[in-house]
Image: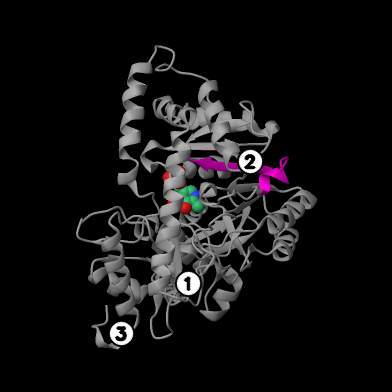
């Protein structure tokens, strides 16, 4: 056997992954099948698979087989601001300048409040007073049944998601997500070797019948959904749909993580799924989208039986979420100012959606969140469009980052809130529209 045969086989498999013939998360042929194709032995195929696993292109699970690794390009999907002259449409964050005075004041007051007990170690789920504020925040937006015993503080919603994946599942387990979902979830499942399967969506969010079928077919350890101002589609589940989803969760007795980080964007609030499936739902909310992502304040309401397990994982990983930020958060929530800041952001989002609709009349007329999900004309391929836009200082997010199975979506996601100045936002949106209408073949290939 030639020593380089396994390298040749690895190269061919990698080409098949890059060309899309083998999609992310897809199961690869068995060793025997590939050995027959390449007229070699299963041991040589094993060596090729090992080479690609070491490169992070494949993942193997004992008893389940070998799979194409999912993408984890969070840095590409969501780009930190680099150049002020860029139009950064990739960040879903509040219009921050509006919040600076209130946040400054809250941190100044926090400094006056520091006591030895507040700057020391405390219970892993956080100080009771801070958990009371967390309960009040989520309650304001429709969550029922929260109390200081079943509420845990995290360093933002991203931490809450990774904490829940780590606590409720193990490597090789299957997690169901929306077929298009927040790349931060895909990054967690990818890095932690969880198998992710997307569930079909319609114009009201995930389909209850598709969820039921997928649960029965795949026996997932966990379902993760973003029912409110879904990232990336912008769809919000009406209450009736949430009740149907809760019924599926209750009947199948499966854990649900409800990422409700955008709950403050509905007026009046739509009750979360957690209200209808409280025994199985972990409800995530937080201040990143309404006030500031830098505060890293996330809140989880958990079924009471699971709180001790969550606290054990928090202690093992970070000991506790920094109480200093929760002092400021508590001041803002107790004074009611937090709700006013959230309401200002909601009004701004509604207004900016109207502006965007004037430029892109085809977008979802009901969307009132921070972003739009824009379908591309046939003549543009999404990654090519994203690249051409970037060449012009327009940072947009390709739809491919949101796809649970890596399939083409023919969409881009645009944040309407990360550009502070309205005139700059309109200018950027118009430039995107001009690019959409131009012919890609007139640009040099990348
Ligand atoms: C659906 C969703 N969940 C969680 C997060 C992360 O939030 P945080 O900054 O609180 O970690 C985001 C951020 O974009 C998001 O869109």
Q: Is residue 28 above or below residue 247?
A: below
Q: Are marks 3 and 1 in contact (CB under 8 Å)?
A: no
Q: Residue at 58% of width from left, 72% of height from top?
A: 29
State the CA–CA distance, disc 1 to disc 2.
Answer: 30 Å
Residue 66, by quadrant, is bottom right
> Residue under circle 1?
363
Residue 35, by quadrant, is bottom right
Q: Secondary structure at mark 3?
A: loop
Q: Is residue 376 above or below residue 366?
A: below
Q: Nearer the viewer, residue 355 or 382?
A: 355
> Residue under circle 3?
438
- Point out the stretch of residues depicted in magenta: 273-286
As for residue 359 lying within the magenta part, the answer is no
Q: Secondary structure at mark 1?
A: loop
Q: Identify the mark nearer the N-term, 1 or 2.
A: 2
Mark 1 closeness class: few <14, some 14–19, many ≥20 residues within 10 Å = some
Q: Position of residue 33 (x, y in %)?
A: 60, 75
Q: Is residue 12 above or below residue 185?
A: below
* Circle on res. 143: 2
């Amino acid at each position: 056997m030639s020593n380089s045969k396994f390298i040749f086989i690895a190269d061919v498999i990698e080409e098949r992954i890059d060309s899309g013939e083998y999609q992310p998360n897809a199961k690869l042929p068995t060793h025997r099948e590939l050995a027959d194709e390449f007229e070699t032995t299963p041991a040589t195929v094993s060596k090729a698979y090992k080479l690609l696993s070491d490169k992070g292109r494949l993942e193997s699970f004992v008893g389940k087989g070998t799979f194409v690794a999912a993408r984890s390009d969070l840095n590409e999907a969501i780009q930190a601001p680099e150049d002020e002259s860029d139009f950064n449409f990739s960040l879903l964050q509040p219009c921050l300048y509006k919040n600076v005075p209130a946040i400054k004041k809250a941190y100044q007051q926090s400094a006056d409040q520091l006591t030895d007990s507040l700057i020391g170690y405390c219970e892993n789920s956080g100080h009771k007073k801070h958990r009371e504020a967390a309960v009040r925040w989520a309650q304001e937006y429709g969550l029922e049944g929260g109390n200081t015993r079943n509420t845990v503080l995290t360093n933002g919603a991203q931490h809450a998601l990774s904490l829940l994946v780590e606590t409720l599942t193990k490597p090789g387990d299957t997690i169901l997500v929306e077929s298009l979902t927040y790349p931060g979830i895909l990054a967690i499942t990818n890095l932690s070797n969880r198998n992710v399967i997307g569930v079909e969506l319609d114009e009201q969010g995930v389909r209850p019948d598709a969820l039921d079928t997928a649960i029965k077919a795949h026996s997932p350890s966990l379902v993760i959904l973003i029912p409110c101002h879904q990232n990336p589609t912008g769809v919000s589940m009406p209450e009736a749909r949430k009740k149907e989803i809760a019924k599926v969760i209750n009947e199948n007795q499966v854990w649900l993580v409800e990422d409700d980080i955008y709950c403050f964007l509905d007026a009046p609030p739509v009750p979360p799924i957690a209200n209808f499936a409280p025994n199985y739902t972990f409800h995530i909310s937080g201040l990143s989208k309404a006030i500031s992502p830098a505060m890293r304040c996330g809140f989880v309401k958990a079924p009471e039986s699971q709180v001790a397990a969550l606290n054990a994982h928090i202690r093992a990983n970070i000991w506790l979420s920094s109480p200093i930020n929760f002092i400021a958060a508590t001041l803002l929530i107790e004074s009611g100012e937090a709700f006013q800041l959230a309401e200002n952001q909601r009004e701004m989002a509604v207004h900016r959606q109207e502006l965007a609709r004037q430029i892109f009349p085809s977008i979802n007329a009901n969307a009132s969140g921070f972003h739009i999900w824009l379908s591309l004309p046939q003549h543009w391929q999404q990654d090519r469009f994203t690249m051409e836009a970037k060449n012009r200082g327009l940072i947009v997010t390709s739809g491919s980052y949101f796809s649970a199975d890596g399939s083409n979506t023919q969409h881009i996601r645009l944040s309407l809130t990360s550009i502070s100045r309205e005139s700059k936002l309109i200018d950027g949106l118009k430039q995107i529209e001009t690019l959409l209408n131009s012919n890609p073949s007139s640009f040099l290939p990348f």
